[in-house]
Amino acid sequence: MRMKAIVFYEHGDTDVLKYEDVPTPACGPQEVLIRVAATGCNYNDIWARRGLPGMKFIFPHISGCDVAGEVCDVGNEVTTVKAGDRVVVHPAISCRTCEYCTSGQEYFCRQFKIFGFQTGPLQGGQAEYTKVPEINALPMPSNLSFQHAAAVPLVYLTAWHMLVTRANIRAGEDVLVWGAGSGVGSAAIQIAKLFGARVIATAGTNSKLEKARNLGADEVINHSSQDVVAEVKRITNKRGVNLVFEHVGGATWERSILSLAFGGRIVICGATTGYDALTDLRYVFNKQLTILGCHQGTKGEMVTVLKLVEAGHLRPVVDRVLPLRDVAHAHRIMEQREHFGKIVLTP
Ligand SMILES: [Zn+2]
């Protein structure tokens, strides 16, 4: 059996991405085979394609962390999922038996891998079929399309773990969310609002700021044309925000630190603009700031997120749907930051 997939054999520009036939994966005893109906794009796809210093990718590589689809085959030990089920993938592979996995901290597992990013060879969502362990296949909310379901997993899971689990967000707090147009930013706005926070969101264009307001942002700042720190101080009556939601890194970190109130927290899940950031340590100790790192989330958090999506409290934001073969176009849109929400591919 062969299937179409986006495969690459080396790091490089978008021309390394090949749309070609590869073997269809076969289920192990505890695995399920999914016919991919939709797969969400993430910045991880770009990191994998470009390569990251100190990180070894497995070739031939298929990217794609977010998968929604229909189960078409199951291994002979699988009991909870059957052919025909509509599922969403929890994009974290771990051993499920170590002390971390069994205490709700699977992201600390020595075998932890982000599905469709660190897995392989030939194991990711950007294909007609993909296989995952049974435990990673969760029921898809019945009121969602495949395209909207594929816009949920990685960004909502990450934003939830950041704001709720790590930063312990509370009603009445002021939260600065960088990059409202990113998948994780659009998720963060909605989660912060759900918890009763006042959200100050940034974006690079006025049309994105308008969309951020429609998602629930109370205040918006154009980070291309406005002084973000000065605006935060104006909006908070010179106090600063209680919490900064960081995923941009080098380009924004210094301003994030300067935007915090006394006792403020900064929670970070990535650094799309670079890892080298300047921290004026006087602010950290004088203002008693807290820096919270974050790497994905747990299956339990994923289940909670899906429940809230199904209930309509969180709405996946789909920027556009493209055919799988147009993946290079999707990378360029993300690199140019032309999107608002998720780009979804359909095989
Ligand atoms: Zn483990």
Image (spheres, rainbow, N blue to C red):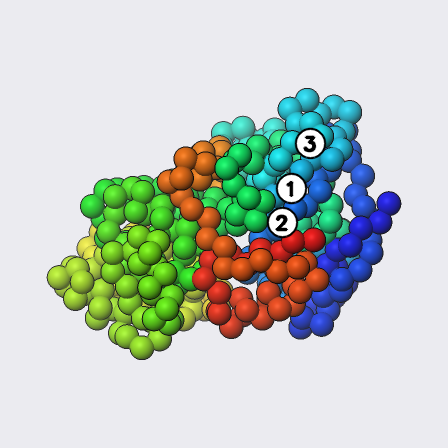
Q: Nearer the viewer, residue 188 or 118?
A: 188
Q: Are marks 3 and 1 in contact (CB under 8 Å)?
A: no
- Residue tagged 2: 38
153 to the left or right of 243: right
Mark 3 Cα-neighbour bin, 10 Å: few <14, some 14–19, many ≥20: few
The CA span between labels 1 and 2 is 7 Å
- Residue tagged 1: 69
Q: Are marks 1 and 2 in contact (CB under 8 Å)?
A: yes
Q: Secondary structure at mark 2?
A: strand
From where the camera sits, is residue 38 visible?
Answer: yes
- Does residue 281 sit above or below 40 in this rendering? below
What residue occupies the far bottom of the structure in this picture?
A: 225
20 to the left or right of 183: right
- Disc 3 residue type? Gly
The CA span between labels 3 and 2 is 16 Å
- Disc 2 residue type? Ala
> Which residue is pictured at 29% across the width and 67% down the height?
221
Q: Earlier in the sequence, mark 3 or mark 2?
A: 2
Q: Secondary structure at mark 1?
A: strand
Dot label at residue 84: 3
- Disc 1 residue type? Gly
